[in-house]
Amino acid sequence: MSLDLNPVSVSDYREFARRRLPTQLFDYMDGGSYAEKTLADNVDAFARLKLRQRVLRDVGTIDTRAEIFGETWTIPAGLAPVGFAGMFAQRGEVQAAKAAEKFGVPFTLSTVGICSIEEVAKATRKPFWFQLYVIKDRGYARELMQRAHHAGCPALVFTVDLAVLGARYRDIRNGMNTQMSLGKRLKVAADFARRIHWLRHVALGGRPLDFGNLREAVPDAKGFGEFGMWVAKNLDPGMTWNDLEWVRENWPGKIIIKGVMDREDAAMAMKTMAPDGIVVSNHGGRQLDSTPATIDALPAIREEVGDRTTLFLDGGVRSGLDVTKALARGADACLLGRAWAYALAARGEAGVSAMLGTMKQEMNVAMALTGFTKASEIDESAIA
């Protein structure tokens, strides 16, 4: 595909991102753990799921909106947390947050975002969500939550599937967070040097090593690897369901538990803290390989939690058709990860805005040709 052409689909944006980003950064964004079976299956499972086409129904007016936590979303899909997004485009988190705000869906800032909580808050008018990892330094975690609350963030997305870091072989091969030989360093440097667009707009114009939320935690860090190693060393494998009360005590807003893939874990979540939301997520295939696709795990979890909490899904969502399928299988809304990261790397804020617009149009078609006029009414009958 020529870069002179306009990207339309998420796969188009992925190709643009691949050509514009240094290989090390693209593979970090694009890759998964081990053999990447779950990464691929997240996407393939949506493709295997077929919509039930219906005809001669009055679908003259289509309403893709969703009511989530008392707010109206333009489509039932928000932007999931993506780490280091400011490495993909100049002040990437700010650009994505602006696009989400203008379109009318929430943006979630990652703990390891390049842009700080305060920078994103200053650049936007509508409150965004904040994502927090399970980290050993509870004092710093508490400080991050206080900063997010002070900035007006209404919801905390608490990621629970990162007790240990999954082995992402692409990152290892590319020297991400590892010591590289001189020859490897030169090869990586040469690859960065040939990405002229990235050098001009991100490396020189975007302060990509200014890790806003972790600046105080790793004050002497000089590169990506040092921040990555801090995160890896501070993951807390000892945290249990009993510790979730600590989160509730330190966060006054809504709490969304991200990383649930098993109905027994969903039951435990409801028993221990009854979160405002649960995200059915396998971390985009970046943690444990050979797990089920999220769309396959979703129905059992919906059956378990019923209507007692808001159920989100991420992993493999690449189109408005996928969003429609997720709603049919029991999700209240989706969270988009790689979809917006690809668009951001390709075209910045404009890319994210256009991608979201395409998602809405794809939902319009999917709903009209399955006989649904309101996203809130989509149910399992939409699946063939």
Image: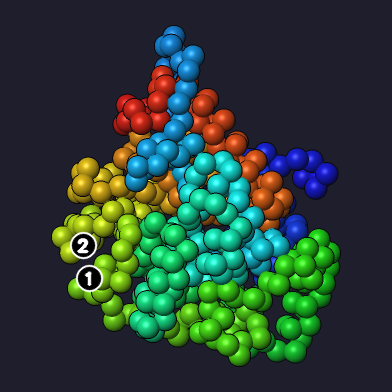
Q: Amino acid at mark 2?
A: Met
Residue 129 point in image, percent of width and height: 45, 57
Of the numbered discs 2 and 1, the one sitting upstream in the chain is 1
Q: Amino acid at mark 1?
A: Glu
Q: Quadrant of the N terminus?
A: top right
Q: Image quarter for residue 29?
A: bottom right
Q: Which mark is residue 245?
A: 1
Examine the rendering and report whether any part of residue 323 can be seen: no
Element under disc 2: loop
Q: CA distance from mark 2 to mark 1?
A: 7 Å
Q: What residue lies at 64% left-to-right and 65% top-to-bottom?
A: 86
Residue that carries the numbered disc 2 in the rendered image: 273
Asked whether the residues under the numbered discs 2 and 1 touch, taking CB atoms below 8 Å apart as contact, a structural biologist would say yes
Q: Which residue is situated farthest in the left direction here?
A: 271
The answer to whether residue 295 is above or below residue 26 is above
Q: Does residue 335 appear left or right of residue 25 in this picture?
A: left
Visible in this render: residue 304? yes
Q: Is residue 231 placed above or below 40 in the rendered structure? A: below
Question: 166 left or right of 138?
Answer: right
Instruction: Please tell me whether mark 1 sits on a helix, a strand or a loop.
Output: helix
Residue 70 left/right relative to 3: left
Dot 2 alpha-carbon crowd within 10 angstroms: few under 14, some 14 to 19, many 20 or more: some
- Residue sitting at the far top: 56
Give the residue displayed 49% in from the left and 36% down from the top: 74
Residue depicted at 55% across the width and 47% down the height: 101
Q: Residues within 10 Å of mark 1 (few under 14, many from 20)?
A: few
Tell me if 369 is positioned left or right of 251 in this view: right
